[in-house]
Image (cartoon, coloured by chain):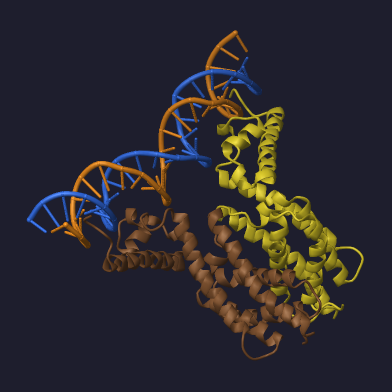
Chain colours: A yellow, B brown, C blue, D orange
Amino acid sequence: MAYRETALVRARKDGVRVAILEAARALVGQGGFRAAQMSAVAAGAGVATGTIYRYFPTQIELFAEVFRDNSQREVEAMLAATVGDGNCALRLNRALAMFISRALRNRRLAYALIAEPVDPQVEAERLRYRQAYALVLEKLVQEGIVSGEFAPQDAHVTATALVGVLGEALLGPLLHSVPTARESVADSIIALCLRAVGAEA
Amino acid sequence: MAYRETALVRARKDGVRVAILEAARALVGQGGFRAAQMSAVAAGAGVATGTIYRYFPTQIELFAEVFRDNSQREVEAMLAATVGDGNCALRLNRALAMFISRALRNRRLAYALIAEPVDPQVEAERLRYRQAYALVLEKLVQEGIVSGEFAPQDAHVTATALVGVLGEALLGPLLHSVPTARESVADSIIALCLRAVGAEA
DNA sequence: TAAAGAATTGAACTCCGATTCATTGTTTAA
DNA sequence: TTAAACAATGAATCGGAGTTCAATTCTTTA
């Protein structure tokens, strides 16, 4: 034998893979998936277009991974907001506020994750992550029902519906920049969600 | 002069235009916009592909018109459910039930209109019609607020959120056929929406 | 019936970004 | 140092659905 991958090479390759992912992520964060053309990603990562294909079989799989990376963070941020002190209503409030504030802070990325037209295979990732958000909320809603804090209801349907509320109600603010109205919109959305679960006013 | 369009020709041309739209609509209703390729639309309408371009400048404009035609019906159906007898809660109930039952009756079409990945220009139509649904609901919510039947709230945000609930909560039932659970899901969705507007239980 | 204008046809073309691959450069172990 | 194995390059290729257009067929009026 005359060649075997060493730790050094392994590390550099890992670095290239990360660079590609980060370039793609940056482009998606600026101009959505539309802007993340393979040539642009390659340029951003400082490699040739062909090199990307040594790390990702297709553009779609690259996009899927970018989608997962970004969405995973959001789910974890929301999950983190649900644990800790407070009754269910308060924790739900925190989780919703966390999602909304993060989305508004990075609107272009949020739009890409929530609503940008994407390839069906990337859309499948979107569906999966919507379920992940819903699962986080469902547990909280279920806990609230058991404790009597929330109205009796189908926690799964409610959680799914809340995900729909977040996506749809944020679409306007995400697309059209209306900075003044944003805080009050956030408050309105949260208030509506709390009524929806039947929390005490 | 030796040629001028007669009423007969006018009528036949109108017929061709309608045939193209209906062929496209049928294909979208069966397999979504994906399935409505120009060659397939032409075949369905009994014309050559080139003929379509004498009636629609691009595929996107054809799709946009199909989208509008179908969505307009839905908006009108929902609107019709909001008028007539009953207090605001009852009429909201009717409107939501109308939307849900129509979507479940024609799931493939509903998916195409609500969530199928489409070209950004068609997506723009989707946004417009979501606003149209929201407007119908907003008026009803506003009326309920004024009458004291619903809680004080931002009617616009609420209406937008309800559109989000309908879309997201129906996605599962639209994609995965679970006939038994559908009615209860519909009931759960409606109950949640009524709580969300702060209607009396 | 003739000639002009219009509509239809569908095979060929276009477009454009994803993907490939022959070539060049790099790393490893003997 | 050398050869084998791998990695990187980026211009050329590919694919496939939307679109075009020269040829044909149809319609109208004189």
Residue A51 locus on image (x, y percent): 58, 32
| A56 displayed left or right of B152 | left
Residue B116 locus on image (x, y percent): 55, 61
The residue lying toward the viewer, choosing from B189 and B175, is B189
The residue lying toward the viewer, choosing from A14 and A177, is A177
Residue farthest toward the right in the current orientation of the protein: A85
| A42 displayed left or right of A107 | left
**Image quadrant in which you'd find residue B14:** bottom left
The answer, for residue A96, to whether it is visible in the render is no
Residue at 70% of width from left, 45% of height from top? Answer: A29
Quadrant for the N terminus of chain A in the image: top right
| A127 displayed left or right of C12 | right
Residue B25 locus on image (x, y percent): 43, 67
Residue B192 locus on image (x, y percent): 72, 78
The answer, for residue A29, to whether it is visible in the render is yes
Q: Looking at the image, is A38 positioned above or below residue B25?
A: above
| A11 displayed left or right of D23 | right
Residue at 72% of width from left, 70% of height from top? Answer: B156
**Image quadrant in which you'd find residue A195:** bottom right
Q: Looking at the image, is D3 positioned above or below residue B136?
A: above
**Image quadrant in which you'd find residue A96:** bottom right
The residue lying toward the viewer, choosing from B90 and A134, is B90
Residue at 60% of width from left, 68% of height from top? Answer: B171
Quadrant for the C terminus of chain A in the image: bottom right
